[in-house]
Image (spheres, rainbow, N blue to C red):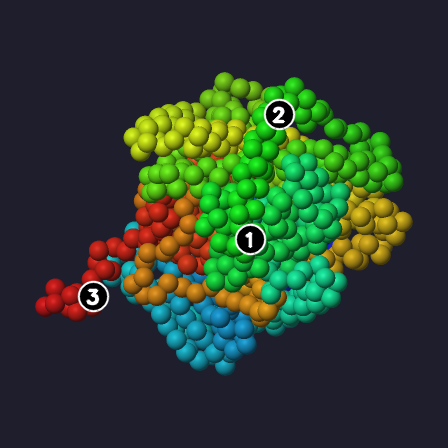
Amino acid sequence: MSAKVLGLGEIDEADAALVGGKAFHLAQLLRAGFPVPAGFCLTTAATEIWNDDARQALLEAYRRMGGGSVAVRSSAPGEDGENASYAGIFCSVLAVDGEAALIAAVERCLASLHAPSARRYRDNLGIAATPAMAVLILRMVDARAAGIAYTCAPLDPARRHIHVNTVWGLAEPLASGRVEGDGFVVSRSGKLLHRNLTDKPFRLTAAGEQAVPEPLRQAASMTDAEAKLVARLAIKAEKFFGKPQDVEFAFDDGQLWLLQSRPIAVSAEDAVEVEQYLRRERRRLARKCAALRRKGVVSGSDIVYSNGNIGELLPTPTTMSFGLFRRIFAGKQGSIVTGRLRLGYCFSPDVAHHLFERIAGQPYFNLELDAATFDYGASPPIQFYLDQVCVNPALANYPEVNLYCQHYATPDEAHAFSEPVAAKAVRLAGVFRAHLAGHARKFLPRFPTEIEPRLAQPATHEWQAYAAPQAVEAVGALMRNLRAFACVEFVVAARLGFYFAALARRRLSRLLGAEGENLYALLLSGLSGSLVTQQTLHLEQVARGEQDMAAFLDMYGHTARNELEIAEPRLAESPAMLESMLHDLKHSGRSPAEDFARKQAQRLEAEQALIESLHARGVGDEDRRELLEDLELAQRFLPLRETIKHYYTARYAEIRRGLLRLERLLGWERDLIFHLYPEELSRAVRDPAGFERRATARKKDWLLAAKAVRQQSLPDVIFASNLQAMTGRAGSPDDGENMLQGTPLSPGRIQGIARIIDPADLESQEFSGNDILVLRSANLGIAPLLRVVAGMVVEVGGLLAHGACQAREAGVPAVVLPQATHLIANGVTLCLDGSLGTVEVVVAEEKRKSSHERACETV
């Protein structure tokens, strides 16, 4: 039987899997003579059972070391590795004193293995789920000062110098980013090159946080000699492990202790790898564009790709997620072709074959081919659209609302067409509008009686009983159902909702001017009929104890932060995700039901104001009737498309279960199956080894794609004539330029604190009513959170995007601002105006004053 407890000095190579990365590294260092505190490790053999025997073994080891104050730290297999550090992901408990406190601290560490932040961290890096965790217990160092040393700092990829940061007391405030700490730069030859001292208002000790005495706040927390000593220790650790190290240390009465040493997970070669990856993608896309021209698929002056709405739905998708989306929606038999042809659009189904493209791991659509699917009889003026986007690329964001025009009141409005065609475009637009209104009126009564019952039918399978070929066939059947039925209904509802919403906006602007624009967002708020809104309302009932959690999961367990990412665990798979949502809601001080009721009341007031304005301006009966009909249909179909998505993503959850079953049958590591295309599944069954290698290579590219996004290497709109722009970098606002102009999504004005968020980390964080989320995109999974925070800024999205709709439902202002996560600093105060689309960085009054003014005041 494997040992339940091992002293640090007893651990050898054979015990690596038992004790995890952190403990194993420290054991190696201790045996090599490094100054490591005494300690022992509770092994995975103990934590996997975690019964009375394991607890007794823990307490006996603690008594043997004399009890007293200890640090209890996670040591999971894979932690502190070369490819993943898990820094800050798992739990550490400091200054643990006493047996009861020790057991509680160990259990906190074990629980952190399954926390949402840990799961999301593994998912993002494509790391297989960790089955167990060891726990390291070290004698607590009563640190006078402590810190972190890097032998390969992020801004020093040449590894010429050692960078050391220190604070008074323990190092946790430095590691967590709560304080900046003093900085020292030491050459590898031992010369102190630079020292930067900062204000250190508090320190963490075994007794808790304490204020630092005034004379010490600006004083160096470490002497120059100590900085050199730390640098020598870090270099020694680097030589011992043979790779750059991140070293945690502490000084106790003059003794230097090494508390942790791990390889630096993000190497200096990352930027080079990303650039090589982007270079390959540029060459591939150039060949693809040349082939499209050669085959006559496109004919415009430039080939334009936009991620305007698809990027919101599928941020950095896995191969399977993108392939599934493309298989369902694109192609001759895809849902887009079937749905739009059913509505009466006239175009060749061939245009949808190359509609979607994954560029450097991000999903884009071909603007020319997309525009072609909006032909209502008067061929779309595609070159006009391309010219417009060339001048203003933002128009390619939700172009069916912002760019493509589907209705013209006069030939003057149809100036994009030649003069003979303009009159035809106006006439056919009126005919087509009447046709779509008729189709919408027939759809609405059919939905509850025919369509919804079919959508709601369960599609569960007994996956555990399936062999690999059966699992592939069952997954294929689910995909065919989505393509031929569920997603066709989604395309129809979405097109009708967008069409009549855009048309209502044009009429409001034409008839009422600025007043109509101001009313527009309110008229589309507080809409009934969305199961996504209902999910949030039901979540509040669970939080209040008015609804059973199991019943909630029966209805919403198939949902996720982003349901269209097939690799994303569903709510039913992750109870911690639901607990996090409930926690945020309970602590927000807000009520989704009250917010929704208020938005409904505001909409009713806006509708009454609209009627009065139309009457006051003498708008004719026909214009008034058509406007109100357009508005009513938009109000019916926009929430309806979210309801249909709620149903069709239940099929996604079932496909996910089937894919995970197939993965287990193939014997692959967790989540590797998601790096295949759907059409490769049957071939993977016949050649598991070959396709495992293929999936592994794609997984590496997927990780590089995520890095490229973090480095802001991809523009939202890509022109074939300027593929070099795929290496662009975001700028920063000029000094003094605090007003950023974006596009309004949801009305309202609020002041709050910017929280720059990676959607992958949402479950692990707490939010308050003073927070303004700043993130890349907002999918449906963020909907409950919008009932908690004050506002939202996204880089990608549109007025009718799911996130925007949910922001309006929640009554919080929202703005889309390209490159927001790079233009806005985390923690700054923002004044967000969702009506004007502005994001103002509020500068403290002292900072507003010029240096001359401050100098005068000083005099």
Residue beneath the point at 74% across and 51% down: 350
Q: Position of residue 735 (x, y in %)?
A: 32, 65
Q: Position of residue 264 (x, y in %)?
A: 58, 64
Q: Gap between marks 3 and 2, in whole Å?
A: 65 Å
Mark nearest the camera among 1 and 3 is 1
Amino acid type shown at disc 1: Pro
Q: Position of residue 90 (x, y in %)?
A: 55, 47
Residue beneath the point at 55% across and 64% down: 713
Does 450 appear above or below 354? above
Residue beneath the point at 53% across and 19% down: 547
In the rendered image, the residue lying farthest to the front is 420
- For marks 3 and 2, the one nearer the N-term is 2
In the rendered image, which quarter is residue 588 located in?
top left
Amino acid type shown at disc 2: Lys
Does 790 appear above or below 124? above
Residue at the disc numbered 3: 850
Residue at the disc numbered 2: 442
In the rendered image, the residue lying farthest to the left is 859
**From the image, which quarter does the C terminus lie in?**
bottom left
**From the image, which quarter does the N terminus lie in?**
top right
In the structure shown, which secondary structural element does the residue marked by tag 2 occupy?
A: helix
The crowd level at tag 3 (other Cα within 10 Å; few <14, some 14-19, many 20+) is few
Residue beneath the point at 74% across and 28% down: 459
Q: Position of residue 572 (x, y in %)?
A: 64, 31
Residue 724, numbered circle: none
Residue at the disc numbered 1: 420
Q: Is residue 678 left or right of residue 98?
A: right
Mark nearest the camera among 1 and 2 is 1
Q: Is residue 762 left or right of residue 705?
A: left
Q: Gap between marks 1 and 3, in whole Å?
A: 61 Å
In the structure shown, which secondary structural element does the residue marked by tag 1 occupy?
A: helix
Amino acid type shown at disc 3: Ser
